[in-house]
Image (spheres, rainbow, N blue to C red):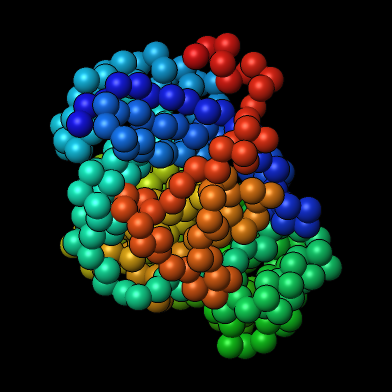
């Protein structure tokens, strides 16, 4: 089996009404992502998805299309898609950074490899270590009434874990978390995510004031500019500290674990340029004596499927203690799949078909395809 073509399909998929999400980085209303298909000289086609956000990784849809069509794709033509380690090195040699574009290509290679041997990706990763994946739902940094209404909606639908976005205004952040805790009751695990929105002094004060809310984690409470701030904060609070924006690469993960900056690393394939790199970081965390949790950039169906496969197969990604963000398709108007994934809101289950176990819905793809020209001008 040889690769014959790498196709990019930019899309714009809106979030559902009432399920847009607001963070310290702004409000997420529509997702300008890129779907890729890797064609081969066999009947198999590999699927991938780049969940792009300029504020997050610096990547845009036009930039992703340009990187894949102009650099990464040509380097893959004629190659055996099952030679994953070789091709990962080759892709890294075409362009620096661009983790989400690289992740889309890599997950399509895993998809092709699974299809070639008629096995789901999780079997290629060593098999299941759990039957299902506990997950959480996310409440955006909205005014208190809106945040409470959203939390109550999720709980009524069966959610068992919540994450509340903070990091905009400390007074409002504290009020929001307290209100959600009151609405949820004492037994629902609740974590918070500041998305770098607090400075060190603010994070210390807010976590102290929220001590009675029994938070199960505080995700990226301070900026990435000085990792020692995570160390300082961790020494001042009993709330477990989760690093997210601070850990894109294996080298960053090594540094954070060496200096004792976090109790948990938030990991997921898009951020780390693929499934293989995500596993490397998870294994490093395990060696350092800490755990990982599956994060999210509000993926659609294909990238969420990739998350499910690694989540079900990787012991170091501890979804039992820190339920994962397997939630992106639930927030969007479409997942672009012919069959929806089995997603919660309490637990998620991995698709069982060969490769990623999902099929692209051509009708949905055509409906949400970005035809504005922005994504193809550089392609």
Residue 333 x %, y %: 69, 49
Residue 296 x %, y %: 50, 53
Residue 90 x %, y %: 21, 25
Above-or-below relation of 290 to 66 = below
In the displayed structure, does residue 238 sit left or right of residue 76? Answer: right
Does the rendering let one see residue 258?
no
Q: Among all residues in the image, which is located at the extreme right? A: 145
In the foreground, 302 or 279: 302
The quadrant the N terminus occupies is top left
Please tell me how many numbered marks the rendered image carries. 0
In the displayed structure, does residue 287 sit left or right of residue 64? Answer: left
Q: Among all residues in the image, which is located at the extreme bottom? A: 186
Q: Which residue is drawn at 56% across and 28% down?
A: 10
Q: Which residue is drawn at 40% across and 61% down?
A: 351
Could you say which quadrant of the image residue 104 lies in?
A: top left
Above-or-below relation of 346 to 42 = below
Q: Residue at x 62, y 63 (%)?
A: 138
Does the rendering let one see residue 343?
yes
Residue 65 x %, y %: 48, 22
Q: Residue at x 57, y 79 (%)?
A: 160
In the foreground, 260 or 327: 327
């Amino acid at each position: 089996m040889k690769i014959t073509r790498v196709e990019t399909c930019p899309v714009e998929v809106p979030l559902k009404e009432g399920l847009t999400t607001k963070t310290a980085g702004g409000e997420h209303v529509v997702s300008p992502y890129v779907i890729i298909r890797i064609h081969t000289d066999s009947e198999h086609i590999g699927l991938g998805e780049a969940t792009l956000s300029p504020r997050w990784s610096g990547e845009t849809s036009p930039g992703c299309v340009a990187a894949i069509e102009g650099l990464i794709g040509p380097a893959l033509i004629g190659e055996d898609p099952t030679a994953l380690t070789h091709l990962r090195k080759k892709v890294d040699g075409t362009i620096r950074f661009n983790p989400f574009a690289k992740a889309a290509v890599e997950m399509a290679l895993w998809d092709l490899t699974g299809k070639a041997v008629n096995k789901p990706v999780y079997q290629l990763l060593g098999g299941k270590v759990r039957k299902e994946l506990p997950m959480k739902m996310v409440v955006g940094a909205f005014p208190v009434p809106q945040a409470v209404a959203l939390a109550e909606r999720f709980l009524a639908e069966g959610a068992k874990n919540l994450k509340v976005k903070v990091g905009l205004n400390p007074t409002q952040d504290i009020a929001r978390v307290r209100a959600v805790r009151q609405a949820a009751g004492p037994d629902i695990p609740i974590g918070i995510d500041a998305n770098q929105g607090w400075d060190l002094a603010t994070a210390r004060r807010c976590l102290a004031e929220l001590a009675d809310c029994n938070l199960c984690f505080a995700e990226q409470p301070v900026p990435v500019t000085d990792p020692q701030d995570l160390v300082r904060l961790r020494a001042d609070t009993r709330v477990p500290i989760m690093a997210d924006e601070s850990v894109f690469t294996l080298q960053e993960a090594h540094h954070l674990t060496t200096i004792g900056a976090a109790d948990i690393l938030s990991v997921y394939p898009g951020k780390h340029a693929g499934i293989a790199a995500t596993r490397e970081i998870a294994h490093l965390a395990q060696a350092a004596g800490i755990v990982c949790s599956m994060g999210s950039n509000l993926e659609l169906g294909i990238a969420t499927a990739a998350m499910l496969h690694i989540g079900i197969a990787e012991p170091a990604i501890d979804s039992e203690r820190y339920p994962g963000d397997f939630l992106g398709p639930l927030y969007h108007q479409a997942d672009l799949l012919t069959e929806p994934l089995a997603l919660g809101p309490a637990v998620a289950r991995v698709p069982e078909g060969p490769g990623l176990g999902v099929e692209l819905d051509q009708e949905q793809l055509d409906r949400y395809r970005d035809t504005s020209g922005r994504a193809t001008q550089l392609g």
